[in-house]
Amino acid sequence: MTIPVTETSALTLAERVGDLVRIPSVNPLQAGPKSGSDGERDISAWLADQADQLGAQVTVDDIIDGRNNVYARFQGQTDRVVTIDVHLDTVGVEHMTDPAFDGRIEDGRVYGRGSVDTKATLAIVLSVLDEMRSAGERPMPTVNVVGTISEEMGGLIGAAGYRDWLQSNGDHVDQMIVAEPTMCAPVHGHKGGMGLEITVHGHAAHSSKPHLGQNAISGAARIMAAVEAEHDALQIPEPMTAVGNGSLSVTEISGGVARNIIPPHCHVYAGRRMAPGEDPDQVFEHLSDVVRSAAHPLQTEIVLANGSASAGFYQDPNSPLVQSLAALAGCSPDVASYGSNALRYDTVASEIVIFGPGSIDQAHQAIEWIDIAELDKAAAIYRAWLRAG
């Protein structure tokens, strides 16, 4: 006879989220004096140890500079394989007006960096698997709990590392949940993206004789105007999906060497969000033509940021995974405006959905928090999902 599972209380779940908040894991590309220990190293080690204690088969994968992904495999009762991907890094904390890593419980919430994005999911999934183990119960599917580095910045190299590891082992995942705060609604689509690092090359001259030089900032200004026109053109067609149309914007610009010198160089960063169905190679080629034409006669150097681009993510909202989570959550499927690790997994998972407790509106804020009621709701959904055959 199977022993009934004793469900972890909402307060205990909150305490476990607070424990994870107290392990700083700021992405190194956003680190500052208040960031605490170095990147995701401590939380990766914690996850590997905890999963081992729960009986998982654990693989630690060094992705870059000693920053490790962790893959924990919990054997199920069927051949179906599911993955729950939780990114281990958080955004920076230098702008926070609330203690970043205290993980306190107050007013029905857990506070601190990572509480909603996305340490809550990690605490919930491990708690549910611990409940089952304590009761002598195994989940129906084999469950991969995957902790990935570098989601917040750095080109999703953690997700790419897990994808490559699966492919090198000849493995495939039937269903995948990518953890993000979605208010427990299954999110089945969001935009992809690319970044263009543009350098405009001019020619220095004395500012009293500008005709002897070529002003790189003037070339950059023409590029910015062309980018705005391109963005406006992208909004004209009817969107192909609920995710909406692509977008384009300049978010960084720097140039000039002195107030009395015609600037010989100017650097521009333009970000392009791509709707599902857009081809990254074609988009990059088109934007490169737009930039070069706008900057003419000045020369430009155009580099793809992080060396890669991502097509949009889109899962059929009528797919079994989306519909089952929607039914369990008692809500309708949705789409998102942000990006996620889902952009790296289309070749290794048959179905992908983004799902997690709490609101994206609380993520990256000067004060980050998650409602304890959301933890309890997500835990109930995971219990039901992991028992499904």
Image (cartoon, rainbow, N blue to C red):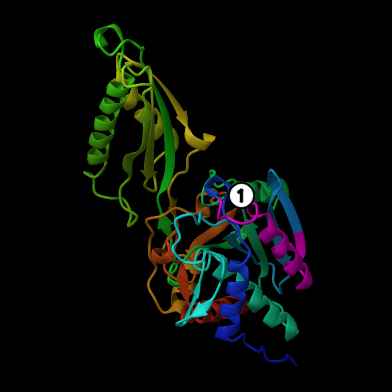
Q: Residue at x 61, y 67 (%)?
A: 22
- Quarter holding the C terminus? bottom right
Where residue 95 sits, quadrant-wise, is bottom left
Question: Which residue is rendered at x = 64% and y = 78% of the image?
Answer: 128
Q: From what the image shows, is residue 356 above or below residue 206?
A: below
Q: Position of residue 101 (x, y in %)?
A: 56, 66
Specify whether 128 is left or right of 260.
Answer: right
Seen from this angle, which residue lies furthest top?
A: 212
Q: Which residue is mark 1?
A: 158
Q: Secondary structure at mark 1?
A: helix
Residue 234, image x, y percentages:
26, 41
Q: Quadrant of residue 278?
A: top left
Callout 1, which amino acid? Answer: Gly
Q: Residue 388: image x %, image y %?
A: 59, 77
Answer left or right for 302 relative to 59.
left
Q: Which residues are magenta?
A: 33-58
Q: Is residue 274 visible?
A: yes
The picture quadrant where one finds residue 215 is top left
Badge 1: few (under 14), some or many (20 or more) residues near its Cα, within 10 Å? Answer: many
Q: Is residue 306 left or right of residue 132?
A: left
Give the residue drawn at x 52%, y 48%.
30
* Between 134 and 44, the one nearer to me in the picture: 44
Query: Magenta includes 40?
Result: yes
Compared with residue 315, is residue 22 higher up or lower down, i.e. above or below? below
Q: Between residues 31 and 151, which one lies in front from this camera angle?
A: 31
Say if the magenta span includes residue 89: no
From this view, report whether residue 112 is shown above or below residue 95.
below
Asked if residue 213 is positioned above or below residue 358 in the image, the reply reads above
Percent position of residue 193, x then y: 42, 43
Instruction: Name the residue located 70 percent from the left edge and 64 percent from the top edge.
Output: 47
